[in-house]
Amino acid sequence: MSPVQYITLSNGQKMPQIGLGTVEANDDDLRRAIGVALDTGYRAIDTAYVYLNEKAIGDELQERFSKNKIKRDEIFVTTKLPLIGNRPEDVPRFLSKSLQNLKLDFIDLYLIHHPFGLKCLSEDNTLAQDENGVIQYDNNTDLENIWKAMEKEIEIHCYFPQRKLVDFCKERNIAVTAYSPLGAPWTEEGKSVEPKLLENPLVLEMAKKHGKTAPQILLRFLIQRNLIVIPKSVTPERIKSNFDAFKDELRNAIRVAFESGYRAIDTAFMYSNEEFIGEEIQDWLSKGKLKREDIFITTKVKNGRVRSIGLSNFNKSQIDRILKEIPPAVLQIEAHCYFPQKPLVEYCQKKGIAVTAYSPLGAPWTKEGQEVSPKLLENPTVLEIAKKYNKNAGQVLLRFLVQRNIIVIPKSITPERIRSNFQISSTMKKQKNESY
Ligand SMILES: NC(=O)c1ccc[n+]([C@@H]2O[C@H](COP(=O)([O-])OP(=O)(O)OC[C@H]3O[C@@H](n4cnc5c(N)ncnc54)[C@H](OP(=O)(O)O)[C@@H]3O)[C@@H](O)[C@H]2O)c1
């Protein structure tokens, strides 16, 4: 059992608080490093399209999945939309490429890597350099619409009626809606289950006993658990074949629902009925029979290639611009003892956006990391704290961030370092009330 700690994102998804960074490592070293990291207990890997290492990561993961060493759902993979893909229409294409490279069906967290864009001269030319080596900036980067394109890729999964998830949501005052409350008798699953939910002898017996119908019993079962129920009264077959009749039927159903006191409507883009629902609602609003704030409308987007979406290298005002319907789950930024990013971290945490710190050890492989004096890993205060607590400098630097509820993704291809960087999690458990 892995001792890794998790941070719960605003959508309920759990993200390991330590992950393996992967920038600037050759494929063989990286595959070995991933092996060591997974064996040590790491459960998160951070990559990006521009690191040009997604294929190697995908190969290593695939090999481990096929040997049953680890399951897909046990690993949290983050990757990022490249600068050359920073246009709404390019989001699906670059996401497909990352999925293909990583050999995965979905990505746990997809980030916009930077808040500005470059022209796409070719998919391999990640720095968009022309024949003279000059970087070609795209001056029309439209962050709001890139975010909308990201939202379309997300999987809404807070509606599964699992007990654990329902409990989790309730603890945080998140209302839960149960779909298919009658067992979705129109689906293959609903048709093939034996006995069908609406014909279940126990349900029929209770219905008879209480003078109710089977659907009433089934709905009551959910309502008693404080769930919102959204029984559907129009079948998909009718949606397709009797389009106009369906429209009337649906509008009629909404009319009856409003008259009966319903104030919540559940729909989705893929049900192809949002337009008619909108017409009926408009009718009620324009006649002053209801106010907009009286009605609660739920809709969903269609794909599910990404579990969570987030941002990287965005500042507060850039975050504010896209803080719309689906807020970012994560912001990934440079943060370490020399650059603690206090206001931005506090702002995000207040807004429910988890923060991931990159270069948590001060990126000693970069020019900046090497030129700064003293180097972060050699800072006398850090070394003094390390000595006092019998830790190494890396552990002190990572702990500094983890204690602030920040996710860390130190990069290393050195087995001892990979292991010692991970030890901050178990250390944390043992010394919960102690800080250094
Ligand atoms: N979103 C963004 O724009 C962005 C930008 C930069 C980075 N990142 C992500 O964040 C990850 C981490 O950041 P980073 O790679 O810049 O910097 P970092 O994690 O602060 O530093 C990594 C370097 O430190 C060395 N190292 C690792 N553990 C050590 C230890 N315990 N003691 C001494 N040295 C140690 C590694 O060497 P060895 O490998 O030789 O062990 C490597 O050269 C990246 O790999 C990447 O996944 C994201």
Image (cartoon, rainbow, N blue to C red):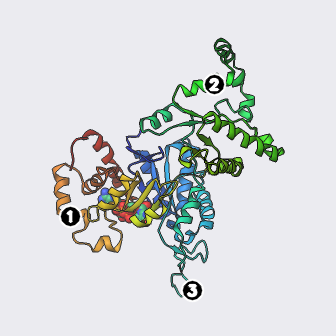
Q: Amino acid at mark 3?
A: Glu
Category of crowding for the residue at label 3, using alpha-carbon neighbours closer than 10 angstroms: few (below 14), some (14–19), many (at least 20): few
Q: Earlier in the sequence, mark 2 or mark 3?
A: 3
Q: Earlier in the sequence, mark 3 or mark 1?
A: 3
Task: Name the residue tied to disc 1.
Answer: 379
- The image quadrant where one finds the N terminus is top left
Q: CA distance from mark 3 to mark 1?
A: 43 Å
Mark nearer the viewer, 1 or 2: 2
Height in image: 50 above or below 421?
below
Judged from the image, the quadrant occupied by ligand 1 is bottom left
Height in image: 42 above or below 99?
above
Q: Quadrant of residue 312?
A: bottom left
Front residue of 371/166: it is: 166
Question: At 28% from the left edge and 53% from the top edge, which residue is drawn?
Answer: 395
Position of residue 424 measured from the top left corner of the image (x, y, whole percent): 30, 48
Q: Amino acid at mark 2?
A: Leu
Question: At 53% from the left edge and 65% from the top edge, which residue is drawn?
Answer: 144
Question: At 72% from the left edge and 35% from the top edge, which residue is drawn?
Answer: 233
Residue 131's tag is: 3
Q: Is residue 283 left or right of residue 70?
A: right
Q: CA distance from mark 2 to mark 3?
A: 67 Å
Task: Name the residue tied to disc 2.
Answer: 218
Position of residue 207 measured from the top left corner of the image (x, y, whole percent): 66, 16
